[in-house]
Amino acid sequence: MSEETGNAPASDSVTDGSAASFAPGTREARALAAAARLLTIQLLRPPAPGLHLVATPIGNLGDITLRAIAVMALADCLYCEDTRHTRKLLEQCGIDRQLQVYEDHGAERERPRILAALASGASVALVSDAGMPLVSDPGYKLVREALAAGHDVSVVPGASSALAALVVSGLPTDRFMFEGFLPSRQLARRQRLEALRAADLPVILFEAPNRLAALLADGREILGDHRTAAVARELTKRFEEVRRGSLAELAEWASATPPRGEVCVVLGPAVPGEVTDAMIRERLAAMPADLSQRDAVRLVAADLGVSRGRVYDLSLGKEAPPAPGAAPVAGPPPIADLPPSGPRPSRMRGRSKDR
């Protein structure tokens, strides 16, 4: 059975902190004093000349780091992908400054200006709309050219939806592969899934919610009904949801109830020796044309070590019944709901980011 967990981050009773008041000596008061002290230390250390890649929260403002606040406040130049989005983040952090845009369409025009600023000894910060810069976001060419020109490049790490989805998926975390967005066109998407069929480690994908059902349907057919997976939606936000189960179960869920919000998919590793329906269909199609159906079924079943009944059903265009013992491994227990916090979910703008 697929498993759903809802996990809304804990909420502060005062969203802007302006009216927060804690009795002296309490844990809250000590934590507040420590945070103020640590932020003060960061603000006393202006960013060094060079390019600084700054991660931002993927939904919950509480995930901002003290270094990120300091670098955004003090860097000589601050570049972002969408000024409207980043302006709201700066306002929440008490920062009022000029923003400059670095996004896909204007990157070729803006990159020489950034390189010139770096050459003059400036500190330049690049922030993402959400999550780590460069991960399904613009910036790779800028980093490459900055390094080639001898400039320092540093990172201010923080939230990443890819890693967040992996660690809550219930799938192995010691090794994994990040694929980002698969092609939107079905043929190209199916070719990529075919290339991932034998992957013996989890594969992390980004996907737009309107294409999730198609991705899971293709994955079910190519990787097999019983391949385990997890779909993480709106991570760290008010309506966070994680569903775990087989690709068959997840495909049916996404088809019946199209999800909203930002989506990460984690595909489980291939089971050693697992034979998918797609593999059986390919082997049947490769049989000589003059071979009888009975003989083709017998040969394919013997070659792949599966039942003749399963091969026969597929030869007729039927879906084969689940193989014994192929039920998906259950994920971790559900996470209890907590009160909501953080900014309200933002709607997607075309393509999902590292959120």
Image (cartoon, rainbow, N blue to C red):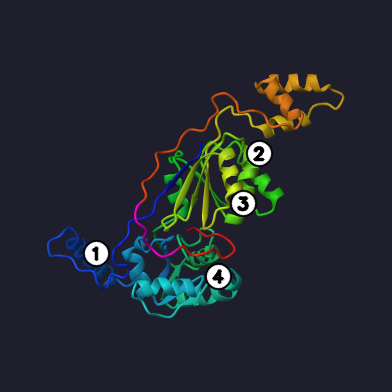
Q: Nearer the viewer, residue 73 or 256?
A: 256
For label 2, the residue is 221
Amino acid residing under circle 3? Leu
Query: Spatial distance from mark 2 to mark 4, Cα to Cα?
Result: 36 Å
Q: Which secondary structure type mostly characterizes the magenta part of the structure?
A: loop
Query: Spatial distance from mark 4 to mark 1, Cα to Cα?
Result: 33 Å
For label 3, the residue is 182
Say few, some or many: other residues with alpha carbon within 10 Å of mark 1 (under 14 / 14 to 19 / 20 or more): few
Q: Secondary structure at mark 4?
A: loop
Q: Is residue 249 left or right of residue 296?
A: left
Q: Nearer the viewer, residue 260 or 49?
A: 260
For label 1, the residue is 35
Magenta highlight range = 338-344
Q: Look at discs 2 and 1 and give the one toward the viewer.
A: 2
Amino acid residing under circle 1? Ala
Q: Is residue 341 magenta?
A: yes
Residue 170 seen in the current view? yes
Q: Secondary structure at mark 1?
A: helix
Q: Look at discs 4 and 1 and give the one toward the viewer.
A: 1
For label 4, the residue is 103
Say few, some or many: other residues with alpha carbon within 10 Å of mark 4 (under 14 / 14 to 19 / 20 or more): some
Residue 48 seen in the current view? no
| Mark 2 touches mark 4? (CB < 8 Å) | no
Residue at image location 59% in from the left, 29% down from the top: 274
Q: Looking at the image, is mark 3 or mark 2 earlier in the sequence?
A: 3
Residue at image location 78% in from the left, 31% down from the top: 285
